[in-house]
Amino acid sequence: MCGGIEITMKIISKSPNEPDSLSLMNELSNELETITGNSGKGSFNLDDVCVARSLFVVAYDENEEPVGCGAIRPISKNIAEVKRMYAKTKGLGVGTEILHHLEIQAQKLGYSALWLETRLINKQAVLFYEKNGYHRIPNYGKYINNFEAVCFEKNII
């Protein structure tokens, strides 16, 4: 229950190529374009979540409507990266449920930490990850020397 509203949902592993997955990712890209000026599409490849130890999920509400998505992909043996986190409606706990589900699945897949990147200008995302126990780390990979980016980590073991 969040703010007096209870949302019932189920989170299902899906192919990122399925219509619900693609629709949610397009909505996310449009929202990111509005907030940051960048859709984020250049930082995500569908194939990245179709490999071993990766996962793409879609959350559905009680009416079987897709309400959010998220993914993890391997960075190393012990670290997975959170990608394409999106909740259609903010403030109902959808994003938190998806993130928690990804953390549990990442543990089951043998990861000890999750990393992610968002943009500093996306203040809602920065606060969301901090609220969910992620702490800032030096920018990694393609985000090194990108001063618009902020990277986070959470140890999950």
Image (cartoon, rainbow, N blue to C red):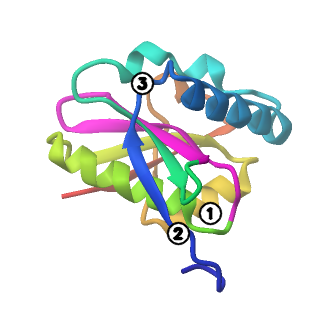
Q: CA distance from mark 3 to mark 2?
A: 29 Å
Residue position for label 1:
127
Query: Outermost residue, front direction?
Result: 63
In the image, residue 149 sits, relative to residue 3, either above or below, namely: above
Location of the N terminus (image quadrant)? bottom right
Residue position for label 3:
15
- For residue 31, which numbered disc appears in the image? none
In the image, residue 98 sits, relative to residue 74, either above or below, namely: below
Residue lying at 66% horizontally and 27% vertically, measured from the top left: 40
Residue position for label 2:
131
In the image, what residue type sits under mark 3?
A: Ser
SS of the residue at dot 3? loop
Is residue 135 visible from the viewing direction of this image?
no
Q: Looking at the image, tell me whether mark 3 or mark 1 is earlier in sequence order.
A: 3
SS of the residue at dot 1? helix
Q: Nearer the viewer, residue 2 or 139?
A: 2
In the image, what residue type sits under mark 2?
A: Lys
- Chain part drawn in magenta: 65-90
Q: CA distance from mark 3 to mark 1?
A: 29 Å
**Residue 87 within the magenta-colored segment of the rendering:** yes
Mark 2 touching mark 1, by CB under 8 A?
yes
In the image, what residue type sits under mark 1?
A: Leu
Tag in front: 3 or 2: 3
